[in-house]
Amino acid sequence: MILVFIEVREGKVKKSSLEALSEGKRRADDLNTEANAVLVGHNVESLASEALPYGASKVYVVENSLLSHYSAAGFSQALFSLVEEIKPEVILFSASSMGKDLAPRLAAKLGVSLASDCTRTVAKDGKLEVVRPIFAGKAFITLSFKASPIMATLRPNVFPLGEPGEKNGEVVRKEVVIPEDQIKAPALEILREEGAEIDVTEAEIVVSGGRGMKGPENFDLLRDLVSLLPHSALGASRSAVDAGWIDHQHQVGQTGKTVSPNLYIAFGISGAIQHLAGMSSSKFIVAVNKDSEASIFKVADFGVVGDLFQVIPYLKEELKKLASE
Amino acid sequence: MNIFVFVKRIPDTESKIRINHETGTIVEEGLNFVLNPYDEYAVEEALRLREAAGGKVTILSVGAEESLVILKKCLAMGADEAFLLKDNTPETYDGLRMAKIIARALEKRFPDYSLLLFGKQSVGNDNAQVPSMVAELLGLPQVNVVTKLEIKGTKGTAHREIEGALEKASFSLPAVISAQKGLNEPRYETLKGIMMAKKREIPILSFDDLDLKEEEIVPLLEVAKMESPPPRQAGKVIEEEPEEAAKRMVEYLHNEAKII
């Protein structure tokens, strides 16, 4: 059985965990086994049915009032109890913030190793293997597992969501006993800026600016584009972040975030090797840069040699025109 | 406060990564190795906490003897002590193996810890596993990817970066914290610090010193293959007047890429 952790954030199921479930279901079919899902928390049972259309045979709901706030220690204890009982061969998570925090804690509890941030899974000789980037995508390794259960986190935005099907599975509620002292470092509060943008790792389109933006005020030009493009987020290169023009949360590259959106638009980014590592797995790359020799053009599907400050106003017009058609 | 910081030597981010296809490992020759940038934030935070509340900052690295260079850097920044735990095993990409080594080192040699600081991940293996695993093995609270840390007495709060927001977590010491960019601005070593660090002898510990047997830390992951990413073909590059360029770009995105 492949068990997939379904993440609930602020009362909503996270899409990237449904991507992980879809991938789990595909591999479960290859391996002639079933894919199951698990939700952990307090008052999350009503969300369990959202996992059914993606092929879950059973959706476990591990409920406890002590789990109303996320903590890696508490959630891993809850998952551990379930895993001990149902003994899955494979456990998958989305490599979201929560998945990256929780999966290693559970792995250590189970005494098994974990493959992080995988971009491919393969059924080989009746067992699961995974492929994952290292050096932010400058190389890829294929990992096989020597212990059971196999554990992996899957990068968001990489695995296609399955076609929603019939809800043939069932929801199974599990009560767990968790000693109160097992809740360590609970996240009691979520702080969100007013009008906060989508995170670069979750966006379908990333509009990114580099040194060529010349100053913090010009990032508003990119924010305008973000507001015109659906499911888009604002990105930045390390030089723009280090210059203090924009918060590091937006940084794409080897010391920032690795992104794989459908479209990455780079404005005034030369394409340093550490930046390319973080974005070259994007499906389409478009670049605007004054310097025709810039390295970014070596990876761009479509490049414009020109002044971004002159191009952006026309680009906004064209996008508005297209939207009104 | 007795603070421990765990650091790793990594190829700098400007490195081109080449693969030795016979051994399935990274070619280290010609790479410039540095202190993992996220670890630098962890070291800086430890020094600031010590400056504010007193205590001691000890740096530990697990790796080959070449790691002494980064330990000297940490001493030059102002750390009180540094230890190398010698491990000549090539990178295994197995976070649990590393976590077991670190947990054992703490239990056997440094049981009197109040705060364990890590970088949020090491650049290169990009695992982001070891802090959580050490926390689990030692039964400690963990807060990862931290951009703000406050400690008062034996209690702490930390801001942890999540998708498009921050989580605020509260915990008691001892605890595991991993540092994210933005936590602080690491200081440069002073000349005096560099001179002092140069003279310091850094103790080297072996697995024997920790009663750690190789069979306890056999990697449970196997690297079956290592490959370069598929090369990206450069596409079309145009040099037109801004208005025409914008028009062609939107046409491309609409008609060819079919994204908008």
Image: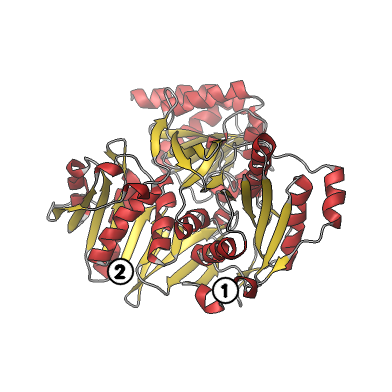
- Whether residue B252 is visible: no
Colour basis: secondary structure
In this view, the residue in front, B102 or A270, is B102
Q: Amino acid at mark 2?
A: Glu
| Residue at image mark 1 | B212
Q: Residue at x 27, y 71 (%)?
A: A31
The spot of residue B216 in percent (x, y) is: 51, 75
- Whether residue B206 is visible: yes
Q: Chain of mark 1?
A: B
Q: Residue at x 67, y 39 (%)?
A: B54
Q: Quadrant of the N terminus of chain A?
A: bottom left
Q: Amino acid at mark 1?
A: Leu
From this view, report whether residue B69 is shown above or below residue A72: below
In this view, the residue in front, B93 or B169, is B169
The spot of residue B170 in percent (x, y) is: 45, 38
Q: Residue at x 60, y 31 (%)?
A: B240
The spot of residue A265 in percent (x, y) is: 52, 37
| Residue B9 figure quarter | bottom right
Q: Is the C-beta separation of discs 2 and 1 under 8 Å?
A: no
Is the same chain shared between marks 2 and 1?
Answer: no
Q: Say which mark, if any, is on residue A89.
A: 2
Q: Chain of mark 2?
A: A
From this view, report whether residue B123 is shown above or below residue B47: below
- Horizontal side of residue A258 vs A86, given as left or right: right
From this view, report whether residue A304 is shown above or below residue B175: above
The spot of residue A281 in percent (x, y) is: 50, 51
